[in-house]
Image (cartoon, coloured by chain):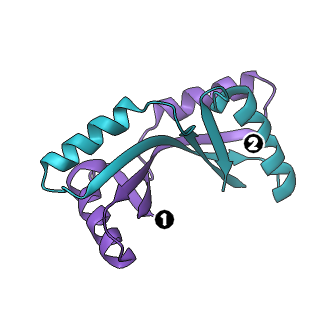
Chain colours: A purple, B cyan
Amino acid sequence: MKIKVIVTLKNGVLDPQGKAIQQTLNGMNFGNVEDVRQGKFFEIEVKEKDEKKAKSLVDEMCKKLLANLVIEDYKIV
Amino acid sequence: MKIKVIVTLKNGVLDPQGKAIQQTLNGMNFGNVEDVRQGKFFEIEVKEKDEKKAKSLVDEMCKKLLANLVIEDYKIV
């Protein structure tokens, strides 16, 4: 089954890429954009029919590879 | 208000980054990972209280900057 994960920077961690996007949008007449934060999105196809087991596997993957828990949070959706 | 957007590669578009992640996971004893696709995630803070208007603004941003519609799809969540 397919499990989706969103990895985002923790609050307080600087996001220069998001800042650049925000400034670009402001310059394109989207003046009311106050902040942009960019994160990552993963769609993982796991050979596992039990949703709970699949999610727990993906949780382990996030901890070991997909997210840097020092500066990032992850959410399995 | 804060609007979230997920940008993913269209089906059929090669995703070498996702492939690399999949192979790494396979090598880390996650043998049952069959496919990984990576996308982007944006959190956009718009100075606009009406949710419908905010989403329609973000939709315009996606079309003009955030997504490359030739190879990517986007979803406002």
Q: In the figure, A53 relative to A21: above or below?
A: below
Disc 2 residue crowd, few under 14, some 14–19, many 20+, Cα 10 Å:
many
Disc 2: which residue: B58
Residue B2 versus residue A47: which sits nearer the camera?
A: A47
Look at label 2 and name its amino acid.
Val
Q: In the figure, A26 relative to B47: above or below?
A: above
Look at label 1 and name its amino acid.
Val
User: CB of mark 2 within 8 Å of CB of mark 1?
Assistant: no
Q: Is residue B65 left or right of residue B20?
A: right
Q: Quadrant of residue A30?
A: top right
Q: Is residue A77 left or right of residue A70?
A: right
Q: Indicate which disc residue B39 carries.
A: none
Disc 1 residue crowd, few under 14, some 14–19, many 20+, Cα 10 Å:
few
Q: Indicate which disc residue A77 carries.
A: 1
- Which residue lies at the image location 51% right of the left edge and 31% below the top edge? B13
Q: What is the x, y in percent for residue A57?
A: 26, 66
Q: Identify the element where label 1 is drawn.
A: loop
- Which residue lies at the image location 22% right of the left edge and 41% below the top edge? B23
Q: Quadrant of the N terminus of chain B?
A: bottom right
Q: How many marks?
A: 2
Q: What is the x, y in percent for residue A52?
A: 35, 78
Q: Nearer the viewer, mark 2 or mark 1?
A: 1
User: The disc numbered 1 marks a residue on which chain?
Assistant: A
Q: Quadrant of the C terminus of chain B?
A: bottom right
Residue B42 versus residue B68: which sits nearer the camera?
A: B68
Q: What is the x, y in percent for residue B72?
A: 60, 34
- Which residue lies at the image location 43% right of the left edge and 60% below the top edge? A2
User: The disc numbered 2 marks a residue on which chain?
Assistant: B
Q: Is residue A67 visible in the rendered structure shown here?
A: no
